[in-house]
């Protein structure tokens, strides 16, 4: 199978490429990525020259470039990871989120129709369901819940989901959608909670916890997300949405304390800062559908996954350093 992976120089995409190349010796990857600030070609450099891997620096909103890509490569399946993904940035500057996350998805869907691609998989998020109250642990997002977004980021992701479903109904485009909870693991850009806190703690800098730190996220090791997406593209039913979650809810402050303890740093580094506007209280995913229908379940125990993740950042100081000093953007011409 030849996969087109958009956004493959980012956190989850880069892990997914590794997963596919490792699990399927006959499969091939074409990675298309604009290399925004979040795209890091360092992540993919080791595949340069490999016959099963090709990289194209492309903006998914650039229709001409996208069509030419589809024309050049004989693609079987598209997995769309490309997105602006950081909620705080969407509050600062929503426009690029609408551009990439909505228009970019639409361009890809048109290309899928034009070139008769057999599967388009949209990587969505649990944030499209809005949030849950802290005092109702019985409630978890289900696939048939209505969309109720809080941030420009989640609104743009929800719009993309709606476009995918509209293309399925109107044109018969073979789409599937997955909505995953928060991922953690190697190669995550250090603006997101876990890598940011690891990086700051290692430097003895203060750790900015938003509000009271009691907001809850459902954490999933990134490789478990990869195996779920892989199941969906091979065995999932077109037109369907699949929730993916870790069944592993943690308050932000507890995550920060785990990191401090693992690194042998004092809790006095914690600083409570102004809350994120519109901050979602709690996410929790019901992933019974993918478990029952496709036989997927998360494999990585949270303590083990966190230990591995913290070790990875400790053992790869150059990776972080090149991001902090901007060198990573010089590996290839970034847009
Ligand atoms: P990321 O920000 O680390 O990576 C995004 C990648 O997309 C980068 O390589 C970037 O260069 C590329 N990109 C951005 N705009 C582009 C454009 N216009 N054209 C081509 N490439 C472009 O994001 P991530 O954390 O790896 O998330 C990947 C996907 O998973 C996103 O769609 C996100 O919404 C979704 N998701 C993420 C999480 C999470 O916890 N990180 C959870 C659920 C869903
Ligand atoms: O410095 C911080 N301090 C802090 O308290 C940061 C960066 C975050 N937080 C809090 C906000 C959230 O409650 O930690 C929690 C996690 O924040 P993020 O890492 O920014 O993730 P979140 O907003 O939950 O969104 C993530 O999960 C869903 C991804 O970034 C999205 O792309 C995905 O769709």
Image (cartoon, rainbow, N blue to C red):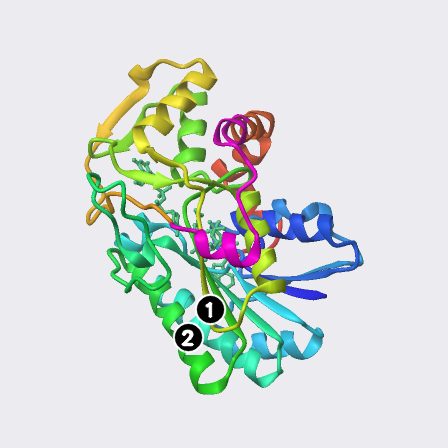
Q: Where is residue 272 drawn, in percent x and y?
A: 22, 28
Relative height, residue 159 to residue 245 (above, below): below
**How many numbered marks are there?**
2
Instruction: Identify residue for label 1.
Output: 240
Would residue 10 be visible to someone looking at this image? Answer: no
Instruction: Identify residue for label 2.
Output: 165
Q: Residue sitting at 56 percent across and 63 percent down?
A: 79
Q: Where is residue 23 drawn, in percent x and y?
A: 72, 50
Q: Nearer the viewer, residue 65 or 234?
A: 234
Dot 2: within a 10 Å radius of its alpha carbon, few (fewer than 14), some, or many (20 or more) residues? many
Determine which of the numbered discs, if any, sits on residue 154 in the image. none
Label 1 secondary element = loop
Mark nearer the viewer, 2 or 1: 1
Task: Give yes or no for residue 165 being in the magenta stretch.
Answer: no
Is 216 situated left or right of 189 in this image? Answer: left
Give the Cα separation between the discs numbered 2 and 1. Answer: 9 Å
Q: Nearer the viewer, residue 91 or 248?
A: 248
> For residue 192, which quarter of the picture?
top left
Dot 1: within a 10 Å radius of its alpha carbon, few (fewer than 14), some, or many (20 or more) residues? some
Is 218 situated left or right of 117 in this image? Answer: left
Q: Which residues are magenta?
A: 286-307
């Amino acid at each position: 199978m030849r996969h087109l992976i958009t956004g493959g120089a980012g956190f989850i995409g880069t892990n997914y490429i590794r997963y596919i190349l490792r699990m399927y010796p006959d499969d091939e990857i074409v990675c298309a990525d604009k290399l925004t600030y979040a795209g890091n070609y360092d992540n993919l450099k080791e595949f340069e020259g490999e016959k099963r891997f090709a990289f194209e620096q492309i903006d998914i909103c650039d229709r001409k470039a996208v069509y030419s890509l589809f024309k050049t490569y004989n693609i079987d399946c598209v997995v769309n990871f490309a997105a602006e993904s950081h909620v705080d940035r969407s509050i600062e500057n929503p426009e690029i989120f609408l551009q990439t996350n909505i228009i970019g998805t639409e361009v890809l869907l048109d290309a899928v129709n034009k070139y008769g691609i057999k599967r388009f998989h949209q990587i969505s998020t649990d944030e499209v369901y809005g949030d849950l109250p802290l005092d109702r642990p019985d409630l978890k997002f289900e696939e048939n819940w209505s969309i109720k977004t809080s941030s420009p980021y989640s609104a743009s992701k929800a719009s993309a989901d709606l476009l995918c479903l509209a293309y399925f109904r109107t044109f018969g485009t073979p789409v599937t959608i997955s909505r995953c909870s928060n991922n953690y693991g190697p190669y995550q850009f250090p603006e997101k909670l876990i890598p940011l806190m690891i990086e700051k703690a290692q430097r003895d800098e203060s750790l900015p916890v938003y509000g009271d730190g009691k907001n809850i996220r459902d954490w999933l090791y990134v490789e478990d997300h990869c195996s779920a997406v892989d199941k969906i593209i091979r065995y999932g039913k077109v037109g369907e949405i699949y929730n993916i979650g870790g069944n592993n809810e943690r308050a932000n402050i507890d995550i920060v304390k785990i990191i401090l303890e693992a690194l042998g740093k004092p809790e006095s580094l914690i600083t409570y800062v102004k809350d994120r506007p519109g901050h979602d209280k709690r996410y929790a995913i019901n992933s019974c559908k993918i478990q029952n229908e496709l036989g997927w379940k998360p494999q990585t125990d949270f303590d083990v996954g966190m230990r591995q993740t913290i070790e990875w950042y400790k053992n790869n100081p150059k990776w972080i350093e090149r991001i902090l000093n901007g060198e990573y953007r010089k590996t290839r011409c970034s847009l």
